[in-house]
Image (cartoon, rainbow, N blue to C red):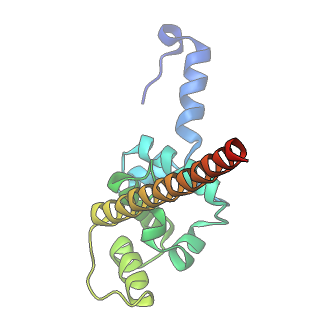
Amino acid sequence: MNLAASILGQTAVTKLQETARSAVLEIGSDKITRKQLAGVECFNFHAARMLTHIMRELKVPNLRHVYDQIPPSALALPGIGVVSLAVLGAAFEAKGIGGETPLEAYVSKHARANGAGKTVTFDTLKDREAKERRKETRERKRRKRQRRDEAHGKRVERFLDNQQG
């Protein structure tokens, strides 16, 4: 890209050049630049940044650890969607992890390890996780209501006992 400093200003040109050279996807010690992702025809840089933030929260040491140890179901988190998963597959491809079809190999590897026979889409995984979270929330609220009602009943009994005696 021809960046004309006389038109854009040297500060803007420097900033654009730094952005082009900097890592857009960081997974632990592995840093992947825009150029490396573009080399495998991946241009979803926003999804790469979202993936970087999630991997930082998970404290993942490197991309190989993700491939070997973290199943796709563990990545069914808010902020991670199918595009982020595609970026992860592109990162595997850019780093030479997983062979010809790294994303498929990653998913099937963990499906076999978990004893799952049928491969499902990432959207299905996310939907299952969301249903489980909703079910858990409903159950927690039910238990809270039950404890509150029991406590209220005991307070009423104590009040009535105090009124009578």
- The residue shown at (52%, 37%) is 20
**Which quadrant of the view contains residue 106?**
bottom left
17 over 158 or under it: above or below: above
Q: Where is residue 16 in the image (x, y as percent from the top left)?
A: 53, 27
Q: Can the viewer see residue 32?
A: no
Q: Nearer the viewer, residue 9 or 164?
A: 164
Q: Position of residue 54 (x, y in %)?
A: 55, 52
**Which quadrant of the view contains residue 12?**
top right
Q: What number of labels is visible? A: 0
- The residue shown at (67%, 66%) is 61
Residue reaching furthest to the front: 165
7 over 109 or under it: above or below: above
Q: Nearer the viewer, residue 116 or 20?
A: 116
Q: Which of 161 and 155 is in front in this view?
A: 161
- The residue shown at (72%, 45%) is 162
Q: Where is residue 135 in the image (x, y as percent from the top left)?
A: 39, 61
- The residue shown at (51%, 44%) is 49
- Quarter of the image where the N terminus is located: top left
Q: Position of residue 112 (x, y in %)?
A: 39, 89
Q: Can the viewer see residue 148?
A: yes
